Image (spheres, grey):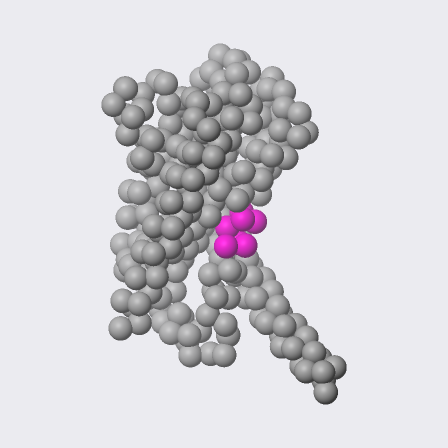
Amino acid sequence: MGSHINHDQTMTFNKHVNVYWQETKYEWLKSIRNPAFALPAVTFPGLFYVFFGVLMNGHNPQAATYLLCTYGVFGVMGPALFSFGAGLAIERGQGWLDIKSASPMPGGAQVISRLFVSMGFSILILLSLGGLAASLTDISLTLSQVGVLSVILVLGGLPFCLLGLTLGLSLKAQSAPVVINMVYLPMSFLSGLWIPIAMLPEFLQSFAEFLPPYHLSQLALKVVGLDAGGSVANHILILGLFSGIFYVFAVLASRKKAN
């Protein structure tokens, strides 16, 4: 009797895993085949890095290293915000979310699949930035630094996935891309991702501490010894707080949509 129950549980678990895998697979294929999403997501951080981190820094390895970290943050934010935000809003406007909700597919599959797709794009972006940095600059990072930096940046996309989820559940399909760009680009600049935070006016430097990209960039910069100070625990705590706030907003937006 016990073995029969365990077998049924194993079958149920395998079915759930297969559903999540299939949803992630087709979400990835849909995203990678969409040039309006895939090309800007992968190429823009690299283009920005070449312009600001290579051409304008006077072959300064320290500046190139600093901007590699901050443009890494800028890069992982894009797929998180647009996959969850614009992509979800468009599918919601087309009625796809209603169809999926009416199907036997687990409700979490839509969110988890987009999370993995966002992480996949983050890895592609980091590989692109790393290749540009290695071939065009004189930066020197150890293998352990590269590994820790990559883990921080890929996992650090979670708060922005939750922010994107909130926006995707709240915005209309027509306005979502514009609104998300209005959030994404100013927040990136004000967090010191485009130019070193020390080059911004003092009041903007203080304001940056209230923005999640700033704290993720400080964690990344701490790996290479170029951060502005503050403990690792403090930065992680603030990012966790933002994640919790965005999660609550996402739940509220989901309930409002359901009503």
- Residue depicted at x 46% and y 28%: 231
- Residue depicted at x 72% and y 83%: 2
Quarter the N terminus occupies: bottom right
- Residue depicted at x 28% and y 48%: 179
Residue 34: percent from left, percent from top: 48, 54
- Above or below, 198 relative to 193: above
Residue 167: percent from left, percent from top: 32, 54
Check if residue 38 falls in the magenta segment.
no
Q: Main secondary structure of the magenta part?
A: helix
- Above or below, 226 relative to 79: above
Q: Residue furthest right?
A: 3
- Above or below, 184 relative to 102: above
Q: Which residues are magenta?
A: 115-122
Residue 3 sits in quarter: bottom right
**Count of numbered circles in the view:** 0
Going by the image, does 160 lie left or right of 29? Answer: left
Foreground residue, 239 or 32?
239
The answer to whether residue 15 of the structure is visible from this angle is yes
Foreground residue, 99 or 36?
99
